[in-house]
Image (cartoon, rainbow, N blue to C red):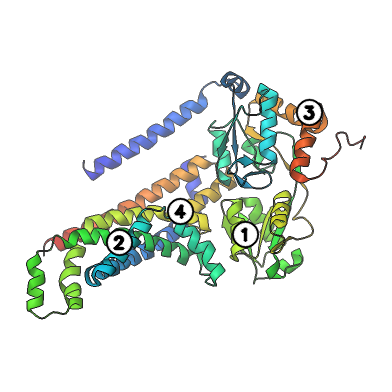
Amino acid sequence: MKVSRVYTVLAAGVVGLLLAASVAAGAEEKSRMDVVLERGKLIVVTLTTVPPFAFNDDKGQLVGFDIDIARLVATALFKDPNKVEFVSVSAEGRWPAIESGRADMGVGGTTTYPDRAIRVAFTRPFVDSGISVLVSKKSGIKSLKDLDQDKFTVANLNNPQMADRAKRFFPRAKVLTFDTPSAQFLAVKSGRANALQIDTPAAEYWAAQNKDEMDVLPGLLGASQNNGIFLRTGDFKWWLWLDTAVAEMRTGSWYPQYSEIYHKWFGKNPPPQKFYNPQ
Amino acid sequence: MGFARWAAIYGPTYATGLAWTAATALAAAGGAIAWGCVLLLIRLSAGRWGALGVDGYVQLFRNTPVLLPIYLIYFAFPMIGLPWPAVVCGALALILQNGAYISEILRGSVNAIDRVQFDAARSLGLAPWNTFRKIVLPQVLVYSIPALGNQTVLLLKDTSLLSAISITELTMQAKLLTEQTGAAYEAFIVVALLYLLLVSGTEVVFRASHRAVRWR
């Protein structure tokens, strides 16, 4: 085959794929809710490298708070916590997994941001979060103010919120960008970076696991945040059901099951079921 | 979003990625070919133990995914007091693995040299090092050009793995753009086209150099 013909065929292939994608996108779709119920199994996209939300334990099993929440959703659908299949991806793989329909919903230390909510829908939060800074003790960093020096390096995850916070809270520090939280952690552990920013529960978990080497700085980077279940936009039936499920977990009939999971992973009770009726 | 508008907005981002990918690939390919020649020299001239050592080395690197040395060099070397920059670690890992492949490619070409030439070299009184430098290496490199081109293309594509260690090459830029905009398809299709461009360029260079030396 001549070279020019190879390129013609390749170009035709790319155009064909794009056409197929646009046709598929335009087709009338039924709700994910019905697809999931018919299939008899829930498919969940998740990260596997953010303890204590979603990570592999010593036996290689995928465990964590978010994993148990997904199992609770499966239980609500099928009366069986095992009727769920997890698809693990790197941080930026979460969005195409949802947009392409590869997964029904996603969890995994995923924070709700207004700009993210443009491309995927979020349920109300199933757990509060915030962004904390984990530092290596060797670095001698005691506060966020200490960190803002050009001799320090901070490990970021590859999302724009991380870059914005770095510019706002420690503009003088150098920044490295990774595609998984575990690579961020490895960077601090190996001395590549002096600190990393991550969801508070993850930072606390790692600090507890590495008491001699690492510490969480006091204070949050910015405000308290919400972690939600994410799904495709525009599917009202599926979104409403998932949002209702989360509401029931945090404030309604499934509060006992939710509390049990919360206690298992965070070692304390969740916020009270009703704010006006603290137990 | 139209591709033209996409390219206009994020063109500079891709340009940075393209520069990193091209520079890393170029340095690593040069290093890998040189390292492959060194391994060949050891195999040909360091006796039985030298050949065995090179064999072991080749087996070790040929049978492990290149992501392992990339991670190992980047994350473990600082622990033993060698905090080299990411791009050095990445290029080194690519050189170590591709050097193993290239030494095997070159070894195959050595067999294409007539044994008589070795006898002639010895009867002229050429030392082993001069025989290697003046007789073996030039012919081996010329015979190997098509296979070396292939290996360089593989190496070029392997640079995408360096996104795992914070190097802002093409794949990393696509990942960052996906996280920033949510437009995974545009981000990755443009990157695919840019890789196609780089690979085609590499092939043209190798084909031209093959044609240039074939006339001799």
Instruction: Quickly name the residue at label 4.
Output: B161
Q: Amino acid at mark 1?
A: Ala
Q: Chain of mark 2?
A: B
The nearer-to-camera label among 1 and 3 is 3
The nearer-to-camera label among 2 and 4 is 2
Q: Nearer the viewer, residue B189 or A145?
A: A145
Question: Which mark is on residue B55?
Answer: 2
Are the two marked residues, 2 and 4, in contact with CB atoms closer than 8 angstroms?
A: no
Determine crowd level at label 4: few under 14, some 14-19, many 20+ residues with C-alpha closer than 10 A: some
Instruction: Quickly name the residue at label 1.
Output: A155
The nearer-to-camera label among 2 and 3 is 2
Determine crowd level at label 2: few under 14, some 14-19, many 20+ residues with C-alpha closer than 10 A: some
* Circles 4 and 1 on the same chain: no
Tell me where residue B79 appears, x and y as whole percent.
56, 68
Mark-to-mark CA distance, 4 and 1: 18 Å
Instruction: Quickly name the residue at label 3.
Output: A254
Q: Nearer the viewer, residue B48 or A124?
A: B48
Mark-to-mark CA distance, 1 and 2: 39 Å
- On screen, residue B119 versus residue A131, left or right, reads left
Mark-to-mark CA distance, 3 and 4: 44 Å
SS state under label 2: helix
Q: Residue at x 71, y 33 (%)?
A: A123
Find residue B52 and report its image quarter. bottom left
SS state under label 3: loop
* Circles 1 and 2 on the same chain: no
